[in-house]
Amino acid sequence: QKGGLRSRTHIMSTWLRRVERGILMLPVAWLSQRFGVSLECVDGGTPERKFVLVDRFSTAFLNEYYNKELYSLLCPDQPSVRIVRNLVNQDGSWVPAKNNMSVFIPGGYCWLAKDEDDALSDSNDFGPMPLALLDSRVLAVCWPPSKARWEAGRKR
């Protein structure tokens, strides 16, 4: 009987240690998902959705935005839809827009362009966007397999 009591105590203490570790990992998991690298589902305006690997740290903490990189944001027309757009240019520059016009991008704003197969709007439709709306930089497209590629640092 003494061995049985000891083994139950050992099992209980092992179980409690595992629960304690799990509880301690919850804030780390939440922080890494919220401010680290995570997988995200985006809509391109087509029936086929994309899954992309995103980096939230560089935009949330470092405020680093690079021209010719892909960024994820909520669509201004449809706030329930997450989209990916190419950052063409940032504050203080002129950008050619549709109808042979040029648009000046004020400080803290950027010009976003859509992919060729995307049916949703871009900066030609809603103008310069605040950089603060870009919530993550796309590192890679993971799904669909036909479009899977590494995006970070890719020249467009």
Image (spheres, grey):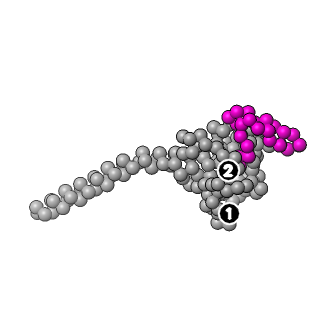
Crowdedness near tag 2: few (<14), some (14–19) or many (≥20) residues, C-alpha within 10 Å: many
Identify residue for label 1. Answer: 147
Screen quadrant of the C terminus: bottom right
Q: Residue furthest right?
A: 100
Question: Is residue 154 something one can see in this rendering?
Answer: yes
Which SS class for mark 2? strand
Identify residue for label 2. Answer: 69
Which SS class for mark 1? helix
Q: Is residue 85 left or right of residue 94?
A: left
Mark 1 or 2: the one toward you: 2
Q: Is residue 97 magenta?
A: yes
The stretch in magenta equals 85-110
Distance, label 1 to label 2, CA atoms, is: 16 Å
Question: Is residue 60 something one can see in this rendering?
Answer: no
Q: Specify the amino acid type for callout 2.
A: Glu
Q: Is residue 15 magenta?
A: no
Instruction: Identify the residue shown where x is 58% and y is 55%.
Output: 53
Instruction: Identify the residue shown where x is 83% and y is 43%.
Output: 96
Instruction: Identify the residue shown where x is 67% and y is 50%.
Output: 69
Instruction: Determine the main secondary structure of the stretch shown in magenta.
Output: strand
Screen quadrant of the N terminus: bottom left
Q: Specify the amino acid type for callout 1.
A: Lys
Percent from the top left, x then y, of residue 109?
A: 70, 36
Percent from the top left, x then y, of residue 15?
A: 28, 56
